[in-house]
Each structure stands twice: as C-alpha cells, then as structure tokens.
Image (cartoon, helix red, strand yellow):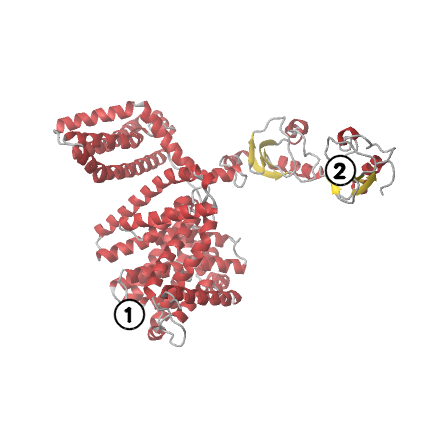
Amino acid sequence: MSELAPLIADLALILIGAGVMTLLFKKLKQPLVLGYIVAGILAGPNIKFLPTVVDRANIHTWADIGVIFLLFALGLEFSFKKIVKVGGSAIIAACTIIFCMIVVGMLVGSSFGWGRMDCLFLGGMIAMSSTTIIYKAFSDLGLLKKQFAGIVMSVLILEDILAIVLMVMLSTMAVSHNFEGTEMLFSIAKLLFFLILWFVVGIYLIPGLLKRCKKLMSDETQLVVSLALCFGMVVMAAKTGFSPAFGAFIMGSILAETVEAERIEHLVRPVKDLFGAIFFVSVGMMVNMEMIVAYALPIFVITLAVVLGQAVFGTLGVLLSGQPLKTAMQCGFSLTQIGEFAFIIASLGVSLHVTADFLYPVVVAVSVITTFLTPYMIRLAGPASEWVDRTLPRRWTSFIKRYTPGTQVINHQSLWRKLIMALLRITVVYSIVSVAIVALSFRLLLPLLRSLIPGIWSSALAALLTLLCISPFLRAIMIKKNHSVEVVTLWHENRGYRAPLVATMVLRVLVAAAFVMFVVGGMLEMSVGLLVGITILAIILMVMSRQLKKQSILIERTFFQNLRSREMQAEYRGERQPEYAGRLLSRDLHLADMVLPAASSWGGQTLADLNLGKQYGVHVVSILRGNRRFNIPGGNMRIFPQDKLQILATDEDLSRFGQAMEQVVVDDGPHPEQEMTLSQIRVDEHSPFLNRTMKEAGVRDRYHCLIAGVERGSDVLHALDPHAPFQLGDVVWVVGEKKNVYRLSGKEAL
C-alpha cells in the first residue's frame, strides 16, 4: 500500500475543514474569513481531540502564496487613477485614521510593556479596516447606494495602497532595526523610485505584449501568462528588498489598466480563493486558545481601542474633509473593525521574527470580535449622531455646520501651479527611468563589453549605447512644455515672469547635462574640459535631433494610450461616456444614450429619412451596434432595433426625442394571418409543381413558402435537389404562413 505524503494529507484536512466551515458560516450569514479561521483553530496543534496538521512549514509556504494571490487580486481591482478620483474627503480621512490609529496601537502596546516592534506592528494592524467585511455589511444592510457608503469605499481604496506602503516600511525597519529619520526617508524614497519605475515600464510594455499575443490567449494561456508576470514581479520585488506581496500588488495594478483586466480577474479568482482559504486557515492554526485566555485583558483593551479609535478618528477625518457631522459619524462607525491586512501584517512580523508569539492570536481574536460588532456599529451611527447633535454645545454645532457645508469647493489652479506640477512630473518620471537605464548599464552592459572588447573602446561603446537609450527621456526633460499654453500665456502676460520661466528651462537642461556627465565621466577617464565639451555637444544634438523628438513623442503617446486603453474600450462599447461630455454641461448640453426599441418603426430607416436634427433638435454622435461603433454617422446610415444611439442635445430636446421614440413603437401583438403551418401537398396532373423545379414553381419568391422535404415512393422524407423537377405522385411538405400555403396548394391542406 502506497504511503500518502504529509502535505497531501494536510491539504485534505485543511480543505475539508474549510469546506464545512464555509457552508456553516454561509448558513449563519457571517463572513467566510471567520469560518476559515475557525477551521484553522480546529485543525491546529492546540486542539488535541481532532485531527491535526502534521507539516506546518509547508502549510506556511502555501499561506505565503495565498498572500501573494490576495494582493495580486487586490491590485487587479485597484487602479492608481482611482486615487485621483476618490477626492479630498477620502485622502484627508484615510491619512488621519491611519496616523492616529498607529499612535493608538503604539500607546496601547506600551501600556502593557510590550517591545518596540510589537507596539509598532500592533499600530499597523489596527490601522486598516476590512474592505471585504464592510462591503458585505453594506450589502446585507442595503446601504451600498448611500452617500456615506461611497466615501467609506473611497477611504478603503486609499487604505489598501497605504497598507502596502506601511508593509514595506515595517519590513524595512524590522530588518534594519533602525528608526532614524534618514533611514526612514531613504526607505520611502526607494519605495517611490521602484513604484514609479515598475508602473511606468509595466504600463509601457505589458499592454502591448498582451495585445500582440491576444490571438494566442486561450483562458488557460491567459491564466499562465498572468501568473507568470505576477510571480516574476514577486521575485523582482524580493531581490530589491521589498516584500513579495508588494510585487504582486504592483503587477496586479499594472494589469488592472489593460483591456484584459476583467478576464484576468475572472480567471485568477478561483486560484485566489483556494490559496486565500489556505492562508486564513493557517492564521487560525497559529491561534493558541490558552494564550487568548491569558491575554484576555489586552484583547479587550485593543478591541475597545479599535472600536472607539476608528469611530472617533474616522469621524474626525471625514469632518476635517468637509462632510456634515451625520455623514462623518456614519463613516467612522462603519470602519470599526480590522481584517485581512491585520493578518497579513501579523504574518509579516512572524516571518521576520520581530514580533512576539502572543501578538498573532491576540490580533485574530480582536478581528473576530470587531467583525461581529460591525453591523451593530453601522446601525448605531444614526442614533449616535442625533445624540451628539443634541448634546454638543450650540457654539460647536454652529462651527461644524459652517466648516462642513457638505460640498467640496474646487479651486482652479493657477497657470504657474499647473506648469510647475507638470514639469515636476515629467522630470521625476523620466529621471527615474534614466537612472534605471544607467544603473543597468553600469551593472550589466559595461562589464559585458569590457569582457568582449579590450581597451577604451568597450567603455566608449557602453557610454554611447547608454546615452542613446536615455536620450529620448533627457530630451523630454529639457524640451517638454516649453511651448505649452501655460508657458506662452505667462510669457506674454507679464515680462516679470520671463526670468522664472527661463530658469525652469535652464534647470532642466542642467538635469540632463548631469546625466550625460555622470555616464561619460563614470565610464571614461578624461579631463574636465573635454567632459564639459562632450556634454554640451550631446545636449545640442539631443535638442536639434528630429528623430529623437519623434521617438520621445511616440514613447509618451504609447504610454498614455496603454494607460487609457481600458477607459477607451469602455467608451467604445458605450459603457462609459467620453471625457468631453462633462465639459458640455456648462453649455446646457448633455450626451445621453438611448436604445432603439425592438419593435420601433424607425428600424431600418436612414438618418436622413428620420431627419432627427430638424424634427427634435438632437444630433446623433455615435451608433453602437453590438461590439461595433459608428462615430459621426452620415445621412445614409441606417439604424436598427437595439442600436444604442449617443444623442447630443439639451434636456428639453432629449425629453421630446425620448417621448417620440416611445410613440413610434409598432404593435407587436398576435396576428392570426401570420401563423405558420406545415402542410402536405400531393403533386397531381393539375399541380403547379408538376415537372417544375422549386425556382420555376416560385415556391419561395412568389408564394413565400419553404420546402421541408419530399416523399417519393416511400414514407421517408428526402431533401429535394433544387435543380430537380417534381414528379407525379410526390408528396411535398411545405412550411409557410397559412394564407400562402393555401394559395400555393389551391385547396385545403391534406
């Protein structure tokens, strides 16, 4: 009898326990995460009377894979563009909550005499609310469409990205054991450098790769390629000193900008669910019930800190962002729990061996308690806000109402601010890409060429190739925005602005010159004068080169097309309105989508025949038919039922057009004369079929009928050759409307 590997037996035990608990907690309408944790507790070594996992090391490896898949899936649902769209309320609230809750966690840990790393990790664990639990609670309570629910979900989006940053910082501090400001700044700078580099390079390369291979991408191939990209970035992140989960999140966020994002997310979900379940079960396996009993007081205090801290600081953060008191309290009371990221940060501390053994089960216990309290806290927000409104002094409530009008005032940026921000963005992004290319050249290209080509020529060739690679980016740094609307307007508006504008141009030229001097001086030994001369010549050639200009424009255009590919596809399919639609509101014009009813009498008519512009004052911008889109259709374009028409008009004209579209729907009720029938017609001496083919008899063209088959000398129905004539005695099976069949037969059907 063959022996079963411990890993397979352990996996069977985990999945059986997870399956049973999933069904049980689904029945109880509780989050599945809690069911997985309970399954882990039962399968762990602390429950003696039940089967126990044998090889916990392998399970932890699978749990690490689970974290990777969880973060990869989170990245697929995330978009860096969402940060811009969430608005100031979410940004202010998220930063306030995270900072204050980290401080609260550190103070609670210090009050129990815990170590410095334990306190720091505890602060990180209780700073993040659970997206999964909150979304489920809103869904169960029917609150997803409420205004405060939108603010809460925006806060959670920012907390997710800030949690990734926090994980990187915690892992860096845990490894270096250094809390100095310079070390912290270096870690943040390193994080931002690689974050921007990977995102920019990934958006530039990966969408094009997926597009070229689209014809080869079956579901299986798409899944394998996506996971290959994910784990490739995981390895790259680990090699550069970051956590593997950070790399998985970055690759997920890159793929989230591609047109294949939804398909990849659909394919990855089952794998993510499987390994995610293993991760949460492994979380439960680390829970020691005896330790929970021993640390009952810290668990109670931390639970109180999470509930009160999130409620108070969540409310404060949303208040500071300009929302009314009731909305702020609804948001704050909804955030009073910890979930997935608490477990991930806790497992990070365990894997780095910087946190005590008791911290993991304590945090799990707090998560379970706060999860059960979440629906009650959400319901409590309304009565609590009314009580606070009655209790607060009138002076305070008046101040809050003046400070929080409930709407956000958007200030138009000055030309100077827009220009400076654009120049900083261009300079930083292109400088980071150039630094990466230069670093690779010094690390890989230069040693390779020196091993192949002796003497100074190897260094000269390496310097030349490096400059050629970075020259499009250096040219963009120097030239980009020099002829923009902002620069031209400021230049002619005030002569005093010209000196600062020239200064920005000179500074960017100096940045490019510094790159050239570093590359040439680092690879070749030469005098300062010669180095300066080569730098000036290189800068002049870069500025004057038309080829570099085309290449720089092509690179930037490809990047932004890839970045907007998902939005462009949504616009093409009519799932999202184009950007210009928002700018029409100031002119009382709207872009509306209207679907032509299936029974409309307009179906099949041309736009010229309908003359919609003259009759109703509307303009057809686009016609969407299935997966095809016809922009600015001409008068000869026909419209068909179920076509989606994108109409440009005022509110009044749109209303009249909508009413007219509904009125032209034809009656599609039953018509007896159109009833279809099957009849048998025998060919005799007087039959119009005798010695004629189907075409000669005019079966389809004249009588609008169909020959289903012919019986000839037997009861077997044969298909008739369209070129063969009917013979005497044939029984023809005819399908058609009753009136046409009777007309064809010249008598009642047999």
Rendered view: 6 above or below 175: below
CA gap, disc 1 and disc 2? 91 Å
Numbered label attached to residue 175: none
Q: Secondary structure at mark 2?
A: strand
Residue type at the position of mark 1? Phe
- From the viewer's perspective, tell me whether residue 591 is left or right of residue 477: right
Percent position of residue 356, x then y = 28, 66
Q: Quadrant of residue 745?
A: top right
Front-most of residues 277 and 173? 277
Front-most of residues 201 and 309? 201
Q: Which residue is mark 2?
A: 707
Q: Quadrant of residue 435?
A: top left
Give the farthest residue toward the front.
713
Front-most of residues 631 and 462? 462
Q: Quadrant of the C terminus?
A: top right
| Residue at (25, 24) in percent of width and height | 540
Mark 1 vs 2, N-terminal side: 1
Q: Quadrant of residue 62?
A: bottom left
Viewer can see residue 329: no
Tell me the crowding category of disc 1: few under 14, some 14 to 19, or many 20 or more residues within 10 angstroms, Cα based: few
Viewer can see residue 295: yes
Percent position of residue 406, x then y = 47, 50
Tell me the crowding category of disc 2: few under 14, some 14 to 19, or many 20 or more residues within 10 angstroms, Cα based: some
Percent position of residue 16, x then y = 45, 66
Q: Secondary structure at mark 1?
A: loop
Label 1 close to label 2 by CB (< 8 Å):
no
Percent position of residue 653, x then y = 63, 35
- From the viewer's perspective, tell me whether residue 744 is left or right of residue 187: right
Residue type at the position of mark 2? Ile
Q: Which residue is mark 1?
A: 112
Give the farthest residue toward the bottom.
49
Q: Nearer the viewer, mark 1 or mark 2?
A: 2
